[in-house]
Each structure stands twice: as C-alpha cells, then as structure tokens.
Amino acid sequence: MNENIQKAGANARAIGIKEIDNPYYKPRNMPAQTGETITVWQDKALAWEFGWKMEDIMRSQSI
C-alpha cells in the first residue's frame, strides 16, 4: 500500500502540487473521519511525503 501512496506523492510533485497539499492532511482523510489509527494515518501521510520529496530531489538534480 505504501508504495502506491509514494507513487501518488511523486506524481503530485510531477504535476506541480505543493508538499503542503498532502491529501492526508485534509480533514476528510484524518483519523477522526476515517476511523483508522494515528499510526496507520501517519504511515500514509509520510509515504506520500516521501514520494513527493524523492520526485523533488530527482527534478532538482536533472536541472
């Protein structure tokens, strides 16, 4: 699951979405709404952020 979330983060960066726009920080995706544990939610949020950052690094190195 985290691999797909990382890819989503990388794709988001590729199309210009800002890191702060991590979808897991939106109220509808927070544990209070989804019912998942904080740990599960945090793993998803960090996976998306990791994918976003990796894509950002790749793009900055190719300039």
Image (spheres, grey):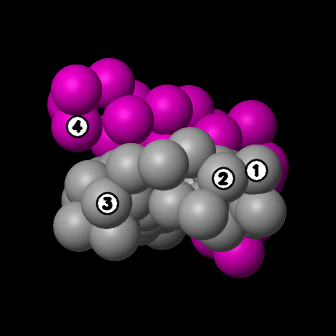
**Which mark sits nearer the N-terminus, 2 or 1?**
1
The one nearer the camera, 61 or 28, is 28
Q: Is residue 11 magenta?
A: yes
In the image, what residue type sits under mark 2? Gln
**Which label lies toward us, 2 or 1?**
2
Drawn side of residue 44 relative to residue 29, left or right: left
In whole angstroms, how far apart are the C-alphas of marks 4 and 2?
20 Å
Q: Residue at x 60, y 63 (%)?
A: 32
Q: Residue furthest bottom?
A: 20
In whole angstroms, how far apart are the C-alphas of marks 1 and 4?
19 Å
In whole angstroms, how far apart are the C-alphas of marks 2 and 1?
6 Å
Q: Residue at x 23, y 67 (%)?
A: 39
Give residue 18's quadrant in the image: bottom right
* Residue matched to label 1: 28
**Which label lies toward us, 4 or 3?**
3
Q: In what element is the residue under mark 4?
A: helix
**Which mark sits nearer the N-terminus, 4 or 3?**
4
* Residue matched to label 4: 2
In the image, what residue type sits under mark 1? Arg
Drawn side of residue 52 relative to residue 15, left or right: left
Q: Residue at x 51, y 61 (%)?
A: 31
Drawn side of residue 25 relative to residue 26, left or right: left
Residue 45, percent across and down? 43, 61
**Which mark sits nearer the N-terminus, 1 or 4?**
4
Tag of residue 37: 3
Q: Is residue 44 magenta?
A: no
Helix, strand or loop for the magenta stretch, by majority: helix
